[in-house]
Image: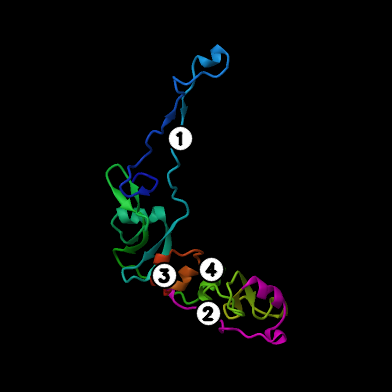
């Protein structure tokens, strides 16, 4: 399939020639030498750039609607064109990719046409994105908006970098806690941190900003 930039559905593909700005022949000539007035140039006005592919990701589901991974937009369109996947949710803005003979709606979620067996992986890697998803971007100490990650038992005092010892934290609480123990401050955790389980958590651990359309397939309530 030819490489095309996405456009809105119903919009012509390619780049139409931009308008041209030329001087008005009836307008009074400025006070400049005659030679400079002889051939006033026409200034082409460039068209605005078409939306780029960027770093957009597409959620890939198995035939059972199990989340598998997040693909690049280009790879997702190739799977659709080759008949290996179908669109479950398209772009909310109605964007589409056009070729000379066809067009494909830009997908947000696609589903494989044939089932693939996924090997079991029990351990979910600890990442900032995964931890924020687990704690729903709320501070484990005050419940405010989380901006950082804190070790419940500070690493300087033997704490480990694990799911059970890391929590989402706001900057204010992180600064106040520093390298102190909770018992020294009289603080308590709002929720006991645990290691998440399930295939969708492996995907969440590697995705910083998940599309809201993905959330029902990732075990998260839609926003």
Disc on res. 215: 3
Q: Mark 3 against mark 1, which lies toward the viewer?
A: 1
Name the element at disc 2: loop
Q: Disc 4 or disc 2, which is closer to the eye?
A: 4
Question: Element under label 1?
Answer: loop
Density class for disc 3 (Cα within 10 Å; few <14, some 14-19, many ≥20) is some
Q: CA gap, disc 3 to disc 4?
A: 14 Å
Q: Is residue 84 above or below residue 65?
A: above
Given this view, does label 2 or label 1 mark the residue nearer the observer?
1
Q: Which residue is mark 1?
A: 46
Name the residue beneath numbered marker 4: 129
State which tag comes first along the sequence, 2 or 3. 2
| Position of residue 18 in the picture relative to residue 126 (left or right) | left
Residue 64 is situated, as x and y percent measured from the top left of the image, at: 32, 71
Residue contact between numbered discs 3 and 4, judged by CB atoms under 8 Å: no
- For marks 4 and 1, give the CA distance: 40 Å
Return the x and y of residue 61 as percentages of the image width and height: 36, 66
The vertical placement of 101 against 119, above or below, is above
């Amino acid at each position: 399939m030819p490489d095309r930039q996405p456009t809105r559905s119903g919009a012509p593909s390619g780049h139409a020639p931009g308008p041209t700005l030329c001087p008005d022949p009836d307008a009074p000539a400025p006070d400049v030498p005659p030679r400079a007035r002889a051939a006033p140039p026409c200034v082409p006005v460039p068209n605005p750039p078409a939306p780029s592919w960027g770093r957009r990701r597409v959620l890939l589901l198995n035939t059972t609607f199990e989340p598998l991974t997040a693909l690049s937009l280009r790879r997702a369109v190739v799977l659709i064109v080759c008949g290996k996947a179908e669109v479950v949710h398209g772009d909310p803005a109605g964007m589409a990719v056009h070729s000379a003979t066809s067009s494909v709606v830009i997908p947000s979620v696609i589903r494989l046409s044939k089932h693939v067996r996924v090997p079991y992986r029990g351990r979910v890697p600890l990442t900032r994105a995964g931890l924020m998803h687990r704690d729903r971007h709320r501070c484990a100490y005050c419940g405010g908006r989380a901006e950082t990650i804190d070790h419940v038992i500070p690493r300087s005092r033997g704490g480990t970098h694990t799911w059970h010892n890391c929590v989402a934290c706001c900057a204010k609480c992180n600064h106040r806690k520093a390298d102190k123990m909770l018992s020294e401050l009289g603080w308590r955790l709002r929720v006991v941190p645990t290691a998440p389980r399930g295939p969708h958590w492996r995907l969440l651990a590697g995705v910083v900003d998940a599309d809201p359309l993905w959330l029902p397939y990732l075990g998260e309530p839609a926003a």
